[in-house]
Image: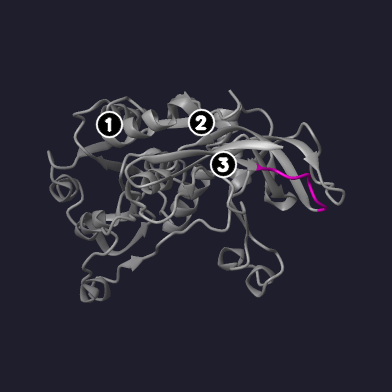
Amino acid sequence: MKSRGLYGKKFLDIEERNIEIGVADEDHVIVKVHACGVCGTDLHFVGEWTAEQMPLGHEIAAEVIEVGKNVTSVKPGDRVIVEDCTMCGICAACKSGQPQFCRNMYNMEGQPGMGQYLSVRFNCLDKFEGLDYPIACLTEPLAVSLTAVLNAEIPLGGSVVVLGPGPLGLMAARLAKLQGAGFVAITGLPADNPREKARLELAERFGCDLVIQVGRQSVEDEIKTRFPDGVDRVIVSSPPQSLYDAFKVIRFGGIITPFGLHFGGKNVIQLDVNDLIFRKITLRPTFAEPAINFPISNRLLRDGLIDGRALVTHTFGFDEAKGIMQAIIDGSQPIVKAVMLPNG
């Protein structure tokens, strides 16, 4: 079967390709993609990536349409989340109870999630019920945010600053509240365009106690006025240079969990190691591969503890893809989270 899919690189060079999806072999499953979210990584690819075009999309909610002869865990008609990177289950790390260190992962085999169909191994699928596909595809990014929040080990009633009000940052802020934080602040660019205004307004709806507009307000001054010794935890969903603000507001013995990336050269920062040592600061980067925490993330969406309908503000098809990504980048539309519906 033929499947249309999107690939992209720098300067919004987005290309539609037709690829062949073969019949399901013994351990593979053919799924029909009903929804795929636009991730910050996709935006990095179409904004900064200069090498060969990359397949776009990995936040996938789909329907099983065909299974291989050895597959018993799913059947045609099942609604599933597709994990983009799945632990192998048999390496030393997996068998030692540390699957987060697996280096033999199953992946999407070069296929774009922003496509009509995929062929994936059966163990890359998580069944779900009780959610519409556009909301269900938030499972993957929510799992990323959840992993960062859990790695932060937020103390009960503790103080947290989340740097960056994108979908991942917004979900991290909400999760921090659910995890027991007594105070959560979030930072973002000034609300001078529809995108930033929509995201900062949602931050307040998600329970953030303080919203800081970077450039218009000093992150350090706003936090130190309330917490002279600094906050317990900082979660960094924005690009690596935001770590400079994290170092300024973290308390002695605090934990910083960064997961924001940059592919355009701004991934390198200067770091005062003496400061980390003398102030006993823990820097705990989070990279959510292989897929971890998908089932609980899906349950948080299903039970409404994370309001997916507030996050998904725009849906689009193939013809609108370039315009939507341009609008997310330049802030010209009030987009919090955009989700592609590749089959209409």
Instruction: Decide which of tag 1 and tag 2 comes sooner along the chain.
Output: 1
Label 1 secondary element? loop
Residue 331: give its label: 1
Residue 113: give its label: 3
Percent across and percent down for residue 96 are 66, 72
User: In the shown orientation, is residue 126 left or right of residue 140?
Assistant: right
Instruction: Decide which of tag 3 and tag 1 comes sooner along the chain.
Output: 3
- CA gap, disc 2 to disc 3? 9 Å
Chief SS of the magenta region? loop
Answer with the quarter of the image where residue 140 lies.
top right
**Mark in front: 3 vs 1:** 3
Say which quadrant the N terminus sits in.
Answer: top right
Residue 51: give its label: none
203 or 17: nearer the viewer: 17
Residue range of the region highlighted in magenta in the rendering: 20-26
Percent across and percent down for residue 210 are 25, 37
Residue beneath disc 2:
340
Answer with the quarter of the image where residue 332 lies.
top left
- CA gap, disc 3 to disc 1? 24 Å
**Disc 1 to disc 2: CB gap under 8 Å:** no
